[in-house]
Amino acid sequence: MTAQDAPAGTAARRTRRWPWRVGTLVVGTVAIAVAVSGQWRLLAGSVTGSTPTGQTAPCLPGRAVQVMNSPHLSAAALASVRYDSLPPTSGPHLGFTIAPGIYTAPLTEGLTVHAMEHGHVIVQYATGTPAGTVQDLRRLARRYPRDVILAPYPKLADGIALTAWGRIDLLDRYDEQRAAAFIEALRGRYIHGWTHPDPCPVSR
Amino acid sequence: MLDVTAGAATRAVGLLVIAPDGEDFVLGRPDLALYVTVPAPGAALVRALQGGASLAEATAVAGLSAGADVDGADFLAGLADFGLLAEPGPATGGGGLVTGRRIRWVERIGQRAAGRLFGRVAWTGYGVAAVFVAAVLIARPDLRPRFEDTWFLGDPALAALIIAPVGLLLAATHELGHWLAGRALGVPVVFRVSRRGIWMVFESDLTHVVTLRRRQRYGPFLAGMAWDCSVLAAALALRLLYHADALPLPPIADRLLAVVVLTQVITLTWQVFAVFMRSDGYALAANALRCHNLYRASWLTMKDRLWRLTATEQAELAGVSDHDRRVARWFCLGHLLGIAVNGWLLLNFGLLYAFSMALWMVNNIAGAAATSGAFWESSALLALLLVQVIGPPLFALRERRLRRAGVLL
């Protein structure tokens, strides 16, 4: 290599770098955009919580409940919150949620509300529910490992409460068909925002 | 000039191990964890010396192998400069940042016992486990891991406290797999518990695997992931049976199994794709591509394409073999892919967990009385989270500084 070759070689390398830089930038930007857009609701929602936007959808199982403003609060602040249904279907809640599954002890409302905000269905039963019914409910919950949270709920005098975001159905006794219909229609319907239009005919 | 007839040099030449590596040979000192690749005449010279030949006789043997005159004394001086002819010493295992204690009771497992875990039948089992895992994760989306699985208890602090030792146990299982596969092949692998920065880690030092033929090295490199896959398959099988009403388990066990699935899926994805951090996937790729220093060659090639190299880096890249540089030209794209996949992992699992926890803790610290348990629990967890988030980049910067100072290889 001669002394004159060096600057020419450096310039050539510099020219060669631009396609790599532009290509990496474009591919990187697209990859980040795709990845972030898929999780944007959860990422933004993990900071902001949810704002009240109702979707009544009369054709869906259960009945609609007015959606409350639903920020993330501390456990101390949640102690004074009054929800608009029993059990709640929206409203202020804790910053973390709870994994789907079967729980043998009651869960705080701040956790179950957050789980509904992530698209899960909560099945809760009165503490005096017969063991056989609890077994039926457990069998039902095991069918939906990603969607259902099952737990006792001491505030419920009797029966079973099915709740999803902005939706509730109260059962006097276990009705597998009705419960399964509620779960299948309402799981994943809301994940920090309505995920899809409801299949109800528009009434005129 | 090196006096090969001197006692120390003769002893050191006797300690050299020689292993074929394609057309070349690996010369190494397992006691010093030092290895170098040399052409066939170099290996012939060392073999002759180990057989009792004089330097002149050994040089003649090397000359025959090369088909030309060679300078045996100069070759040995080169080995001495590299440290291969130093006095016998204890195994070091590399970097100055790692302090560790060898786990002697594990190292008592014999070669034969270890061999049973890596025979044909065992590898078939690991293969079946991998296929099973892929099939379940494809066919049963409801059993795929989600970041929410980490909150398997109503108390996130208690959940984190339980997950930490579970994660450590799973990491130990991975390293034990490497170690046992090395032991099965008779390689003197060290298994130790040590720390990197403030993190406790288990390590199996696979340096000596370079003394094996390349096709024999796949076992030790793959073993960690094979064991991870087996644990993952077992966890998924138990969850499948439980959710099919075929296996009565306490509900909390199912949720803990979901944590194991989450941990193993993250670990396996990291091991396969984090080639830019010398993961197991990198070791397998470098072995399959018959490279010696693909890691640095790829980083330097990528840096040269996207930014520029310093004079030292240019010299380092020029010192890498032509073959490694050729492979690095396309393999550096694997680094970019690995970074993208690990970014996806971070986004889908790490950030969502970290954001939620951080917000909950900040809310508790701001809203709860300083005398309350919630305040102190959240303060302790926030400190831990900050260490986990800020610690790795700080530690990486420290490693970089030490590497530049020549303290760390």
Image (spheres, rainbow, N blue to C red):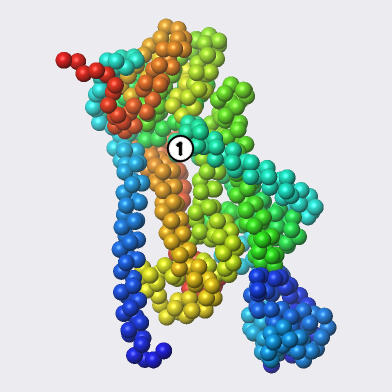
Q: Position of residue A35 (x, y in %)?
A: 36, 46
For this view, does B349 lie left or right of residue A8?
right
The percent coordinates of residue A46 (x first, y second) are 34, 38
Q: Is residue B38 left or right of residue A132?
A: right
Q: Is residue B113 left or right of residue B27?
A: right
Q: Is residue B98 visible?
A: no
What crowding class fits label 1: few (fewer than 14 Cα within 10 Å), some (14-19), or many (20 or more)? some
Q: Is residue A123 above or below residue B10?
A: above
Element at badge 1? loop
| Image coords of residue B82 (percent x, y) | 63, 80
Q: Locate residue A32, reporting x and y percent.
A: 34, 51
Residue at 49%, 79% in the rendered image:
B318
Q: Hey, which quadrant is residue B202 in on the image?
A: bottom right
Give the chain of mark 1.
B
Q: Residue at x 70, y 57 (%)?
A: B182
Nearest the eye: B202 or B375: B202
Q: Which residue is mark 1?
A: B146
